[in-house]
Image (spheres, rainbow, N blue to C red):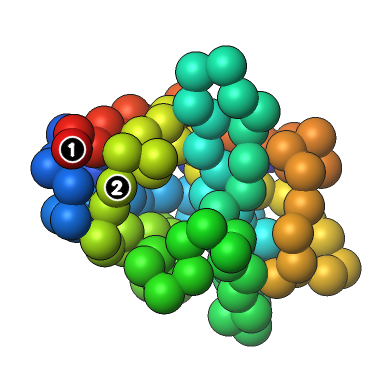
């Protein structure tokens, strides 16, 4: 069982930045694939980034490459999503998800992940 708690969402103007945090239960943190997903109203949940906690391998969706950065603090069992140059299309409910895959750092559908946080809202106004 992996417990995840997100924080850091909020409202920002276009061009601004936000940093999301996902705190995972410490005793299960190693060898996890931790992904950030987002879901806008009327749209499917999409993966925006992921990181392998025991190697640092990362994945980014094309729509966020160069603007978002995923990172981790192993000592805190926490993964971060730094979001820069935000635009209105980034408005969504953002979720942290976790699973134990042999291969992380590739695009995966939401259905591949068993463990989810409660979500945190990001709203970008133009």
Q: Residue at x 63, y 69 (%)?
A: 59
| Nearer to me, 117 or 43 | 43
**SS at circle 2:** loop
SS under mark 1: loop
Residue 66 relative to residue 29: left or right: left
Discs 1, 2 touching: Cβ within 8 Å: yes
Q: Position of residue 3 (x, y in %)?
A: 54, 38
Residue 48, percent from left and from top? 55, 53
**Disc 2: CA contacts within 10 A as few (<14), some (14-19) or many (>=20):** some
Mark 2 sits on what residue? Answer: 87
Q: Is residue 78 above or below residue 112?
A: below
Residue 13 vs 73, above or below: the answer is above
Mark found first going from the N terminus, 1 or 2: 2
Disc on res. 126: 1
Q: Residues within 10 Å of mark 1 (few under 14, many from 20)?
A: few
Residue in the image at 26% along x and 62% along y: 84
Decide if residue 80 is on the left or right side of residue 16: right
């Amino acid at each position: 069982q992996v417990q995840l708690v997100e924080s850091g969402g909020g409202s920002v103007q276009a061009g601004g930045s936000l940093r999301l945090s996902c705190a995972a239960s410490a005793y299960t943190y190693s060898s996890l694939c931790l992904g950030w997903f987002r879901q806008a109203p009327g749209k499917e949940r999409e993966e925006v980034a992921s990181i392998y906690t025991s190697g640092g391998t990362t994945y980014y969706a094309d729509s966020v490459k160069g603007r978002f950065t995923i990172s981790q603090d192993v000592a805190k069992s926490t993964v971060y999503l730094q979001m820069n140059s935000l635009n209105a299309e980034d408005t969504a409910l953002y979720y942290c998800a976790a699973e134990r895959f042999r291969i992380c750092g590739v695009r995966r559908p939401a259905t591949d992940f068993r463990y989810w946080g409660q979500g945190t809202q990001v709203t970008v106004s133009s």
